[in-house]
Image (cartoon, rainbow, N blue to C red):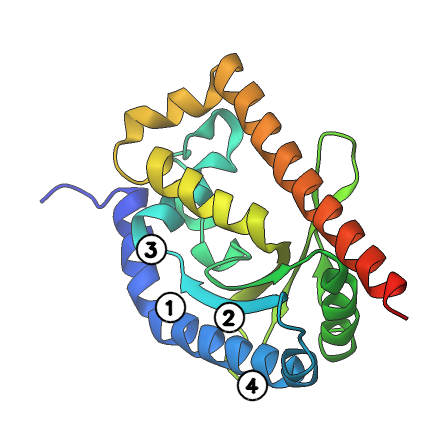
């Protein structure tokens, strides 16, 4: 019988970790929803806040770990050094907010609860923070699996979902499409337009609110 490959070992590890991954997702989502209750109850009619959770699938987890290696390949002579527990986002929560003025408030509230978690912000092309992102352990749920939460402008987050589903999910060959210069340029244009829409909407709403005083 042929020796198991590194991928075989990692797939086995994934299903060993799956109960912990599920507990982390449930714990993290419950805590995020609880700590954002005050904000949720104070939203105005035009404001939106959604909390979404997800678990990274087995194949995606193995691919993510592979991409972190030199040359994006596993070293078959060192199978013992690879573990999916090194990934920071096996379980994750994404908080979507519209308009963007709520992002800082949400971030500050969650930082009080997750003060020991490590920041890893998503930056735009100007090196400004596009989305807040943090990772760490939910000790009550697992000491083996890390969780991640993101605070993202809603329009940007919804675009990420469409982009990911259209390009990365259906066919591995489509991943090359995202790397094409023209597609990268269009992606930047869409993200920039969504940011400008949110900023202009908020400016007009705040201006209308001030004029009504």
Query: Which residue is found at the position 9% from the left and 45% from the top?
Result: 1
- Marks 1 and 3: CB-CB under 8 Å? no
Q: Residue 140's mark? A: 4
Q: Residue 102's mark? A: none
* Disc 1, SS: helix
Q: Is residue 116 visible?
A: no
Of badges 2 and 3, the one in the foreground is: 3
Q: Earlier in the sequence, mark 1 or mark 3?
A: 1
- Marks 2 and 3: CB-CB under 8 Å? no
Cα–Cα span, label 1 and label 3: 12 Å
Relative placement, left or right, of 75 versus 108 is: left
* Disc 2, SS: loop
Cα–Cα span, label 2 and label 3: 17 Å
Q: Residue furthest left?
A: 1
Q: Rate crowding at label 4 as few (under 14), some (14 to 19) or many (20 or more) other CA atoms within 10 Å.
A: few
Which residue is under mark 1? 17
Residue 147 in picture, x, y percent from top left = 55, 66
Q: Rate crowding at label 1 as few (under 14), some (14 to 19) or many (20 or more) other CA atoms within 10 Å.
A: some
Of badges 2 and 4, the one in the foreground is: 4
* Disc 4, SS: loop
Which residue is under mark 3? 57
Count of marks, rendered view: 4
Which residue is under mark 2? 144
Residue 1, above or below 57: above
Q: Quadrant of residue 39?
A: bottom right
Residue 77 in picture, x, y percent from top left = 39, 35
Of badges 3 and 4, the one in the foreground is: 3
Cα–Cα span, label 1 and label 2: 8 Å
């Amino acid at each position: 019988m042929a020796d198991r490959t590194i991928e075989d070992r990692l797939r086995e590890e994934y299903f060993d970790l799956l109960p912990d991954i599920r507990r982390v997702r449930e714990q993290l989502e419950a805590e995020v929803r609880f700590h954002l209750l005050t904000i949720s109850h104070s939203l105005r009619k035009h404001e939106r806040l959604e909390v979404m959770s997800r678990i990274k699938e087995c194949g995606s987890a193995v691919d993510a770990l592979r991409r972190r290696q030199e040359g994006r390949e596993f070293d078959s002579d060192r199978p013992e050094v690879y573990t999916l527990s090194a990934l920071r986002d096996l379980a994750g929560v994404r908080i979507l907010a519209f308009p963007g003025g709520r992002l800082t408030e949400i971030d500050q509230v969650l930082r009080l609860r997750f003060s020991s978690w490590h920041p890893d912000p998503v930056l735009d092309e100007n090196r400004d923070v596009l989305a807040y992102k943090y990772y760490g352990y939910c000790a009550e749920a697992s000491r083996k699996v890390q969780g991640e939460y993101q605070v993202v402008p809603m329009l940007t987050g919804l675009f990420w979902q469409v982009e990911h589903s259209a390009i990365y999910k259906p066919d591995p060959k489509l991943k090359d499409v995202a790397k094409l210069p023209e597609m990268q340029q269009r992606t930047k244009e869409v993200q920039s337009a969504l940011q400008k829409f949110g900023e202009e909407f908020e400016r007009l709403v705040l201006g209308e609110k001030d004029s009504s005083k």
